[in-house]
Image (cartoon, rainbow, N blue to C red):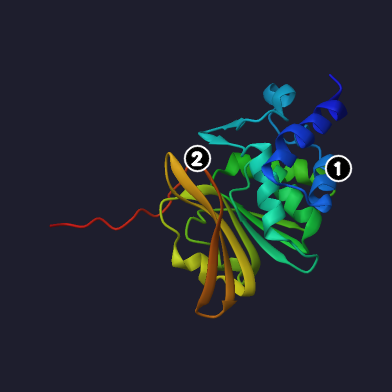
C-alpha cells in the first residue's frame, strides 16, 4: 500500500471537503502519521472515513473531525492545552505539534500507557499524560488556553469554562445521539462567554459524562 498516496487522498477527499483549508493544519496531517497511532489490526484502515475501535468501548474520531477540531481551535505556540480523552494519542500529537504544552487525561489506564509509548517514540516531550476522570474538567493544571473534549457530553459542565484562561477556547461535543453539536466557546473575560456551533455530528459519549438534571413531579 502506498501510504503517502492514501494520505493524500484522505486530505483531498475527506479533509478539504469538510472546510479544513488551513495550510498549517493540512501540512500537520501530512507530517504526523496517523497509521502509527492506530491499533496494529486497523493500520490499513487508518485513513478511512470512520471511527477506528481502540478497545474497551473507545474509538478514534474520524480524520475529518479531528482535523476540523484542530483548525477551529487556532492553537498558538504559547498555548497550554487540556485534552479530555487521550485515546490513541494521535489527537494529542496533533495538538502538541502546535501548542507549548498538552495535558491529556484518559480514564482507561491501558490506553494512556499505549499512547505514552507512541508519543515518546515520536519525540513529543511537551505532553503530560494523566489517568483519571476529567468529565468535569481537570483542575490539576488549570487554567488552560485551550480545552478540547473528544467524547460527547449531554450537557456542558460549568467547570470546563471555569478552567479556561481569559481569551481561552473550549471545543466540546454537546447533546445526545443522534444529534450533537461541536460547540466552540470563547471566554471573553471572567463571566462572559461567546459560543458558536461549528458543525453537527454524532460521536461516542464521554465516560461518566454528567447527565441533565431530572425533574420530579
For the question of whether residue 206 can be seen, the reply is no
Badge 1 element: helix
For the question of whether residue 177 can be seen, the reply is yes
| Rendered position, 186 above or below 50 | below
Badge 2: how crowded within 10 Å, few (<14), some, or many (20+)?
Answer: some
Viewport quadrant of the N terminus: top right
Q: Position of residue 157 (x, y in %)?
A: 44, 62
Badge 2 element: loop
**Between 37 and 13, the one nearer to me in the picture:** 13
Q: Which residue position holds label 2?
A: 204
Q: Residue at x 70, y 24 (%)?
A: 45
Query: Label 1, label 2: how many angstroms apart (C-alpha)?
Result: 27 Å
Residue 31: which disc?
A: 1
Going from N to C along the chain, the mark reached first, 1 or 2, is 1
Tell whether 126 sits left or right of 136: right
Total residue callouts:
2
| Rendered position, 120 above or below 162 | above
Tell whether 206 sits left or right of 15: left
Tell whether 112 sits left or right of 132: right
Q: Residue at x 78, y 69 (%)?
A: 78
Badge 1: how crowded within 10 Å, few (<14), some, or many (20+)?
Answer: few
Q: Position of residue 214 (x, y in %)?
A: 25, 55
Amino acid at each position: 500500500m502506498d501510504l503517502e498516496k492514501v494520505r493524500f487522498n484522505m486530505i483531498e477527499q475527506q479533509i478539504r471537503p469538510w472546510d479544513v483549508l488551513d495550510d498549517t493544519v493540512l501540512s500537520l496531517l501530512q507530517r504526523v502519521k496517523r497509521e502509527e497511532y492506530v491499533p496494529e489490526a486497523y493500520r490499513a484502515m487508518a485513513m478511512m472515513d470512520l471511527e477506528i475501535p481502540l478497545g474497551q468501548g473507545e474509538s478514534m474520531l474520524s480524520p475529518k473531525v479531528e482535523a476540523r477540531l484542530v483548525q477551529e481551535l487556532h492553537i498558538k505556540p504559547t498555548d497550554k492545552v487540556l485534552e479530555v480523552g487521550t485515546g490513541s494519542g494521535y489527537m494529542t500529537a496533533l495538538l502538541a505539534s502546535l501548542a507549548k504544552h498538552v495535558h491529556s487525561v484518559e480514564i482507561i489506564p491501558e490506553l494512556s500507557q499505549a499512547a505514552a509509548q507512541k508519543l515518546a517514540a515520536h519525540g513529543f516531550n511537551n505532553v503530560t499524560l494523566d489517568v483519571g476522570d476529567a468529565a468535569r474538567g481537570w483542575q490539576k493544571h488549570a487554567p488552560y488556553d485551550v480545552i478540547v473534549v473528544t467524547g460527547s457530553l449531554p450537557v456542558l459542565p460549568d467547570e470546563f469554562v471555569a478552567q479556561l484562561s481569559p481569551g481561552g477556547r473550549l471545543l466540546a461535543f454537546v447533546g445526545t445521539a443522534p444529534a450533537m453539536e461541536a460547540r466552540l466557546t470563547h471566554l471573553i473575560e471572567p463571566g462572559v462567554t461567546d459560543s458558536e456551533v461549528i458543525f453537527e455530528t454524532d460521536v461516542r459519549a464521554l465516560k461518566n459524562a454528567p447527565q441533565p438534571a431530572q425533574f420530579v413531579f
